[in-house]
Image: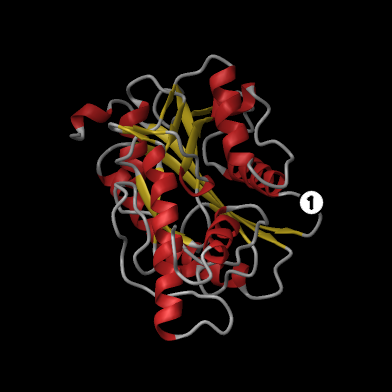
Amino acid sequence: MTIRDLGRLVDVVVVVPARDEADRIVSCLHSVRISLRQAAQAGAVGHVAVAVVGHHCADDTLGRAEQVLADLPHVLVTDSTSTSVGDVRALGVRAALDVLPGRGGSSSGSSRSLVGGAAREVWILNTDADSIVPASWVTDVLAHARNGHQAVIGMAALAQAGAATANGAAGAPGEAAGAPGATGSTRARRISAAQTAYRTIIRAGLHGDSHDHVYGANLAVRADAYAAIGGFRSVPVGEDRALADAVVGHGRSVVRPRDVLVTTSARRHGRAVGGLATLLDTLDRAFPDGSTG
């Protein structure tokens, strides 16, 4: 995809929910900065804004976020009232749109450009504080958007040892997690069995260049489509899939490319019960002796 293929400018907000992610938020936001800069250099984006929502944080997540984002339009939200991950993401979207330069308080999903006052599309890109986006992330999302889609649902590779990727292959090296008390060869077998089971789940949802999976860490939607469906649902888990299903149900075009890929943590104890970490922990515990059959 060339710069010429990207067409006219769009405005972009990036939303990152976080809970006690002081150890990870800097790497996440640095990757977001790099991706936004590359998209700007490619002539793909106009105005940008980043929102980080610190949900019940007891550490310095927001302080570290401020250090990274100081010279970008951004907003840091201290949230102690949301009761679901859907609420947290929705709060972040509202905050990001409110501070997007040139938007002028519009609720229509468009902003005003600095040239001639023409309306520009606004895209909402979501990721997670324990994730790293590639330098091409924003550009890749918008390249797919240029084909008339209102949502782009990418894939996620696991960051830790032997984790499944979008291609169903082994991921990058990293720390190995096992059950308390599991050591040596038993731990290695257990991890291998859980990862094999996870790869099976991933492969079952792959269809050529597309897939059936949904990750909140790699989910983009055009602002007008987001507004039309009422945004993220107030649900404790599965808010990402609920949003994707609502966009489809509203008759909007959705693309699920395997080539839009972020890297996310393979930790077994995450911030949202029922999320990816819960699945990985369940698979880990399902094979106490490392046997898959």
Residue 232: x percent and y percent?
66, 36
Q: Residue at x 18, y 34 (%)?
A: 2
Q: Residue at x 64, y 33 (%)?
A: 105
Q: Amino acid at mark 1?
A: Thr
Q: Residue at x 66, y 56 (%)?
A: 272
Q: Nearer the viewer, residue 94 or 251?
A: 251
In the displayed image of the protein, which residue is found farthest to the top?
251
Residue 58 found in image quarter: bottom right
Specify whether residue 196 is in view.
yes
Relative vertical location of residue 156 with respect to residue 229 in this rendering, above or below: below
Relative vertical location of residue 158 with respect to residue 246 in this rendering, above or below: below
Label 1: which residue?
Answer: 83
Relative vertical location of residue 129 with respect to residue 227 in this rendering, above or below: below
The image's colour scheme reads: secondary structure
Residue 40: x percent and y percent?
32, 44
Describe residue 99's horizontal placement relative to residue 33 as left or right. Answer: right
Residue 293: x percent and y percent?
44, 57
Describe residue 193's horizontal placement relative to residue 63 as left or right. Answer: left
Q: Nearer the viewer, residue 17 or 44?
A: 17
Specify whether residue 32 is in view.
no
Residue 1: x percent and y percent?
20, 34
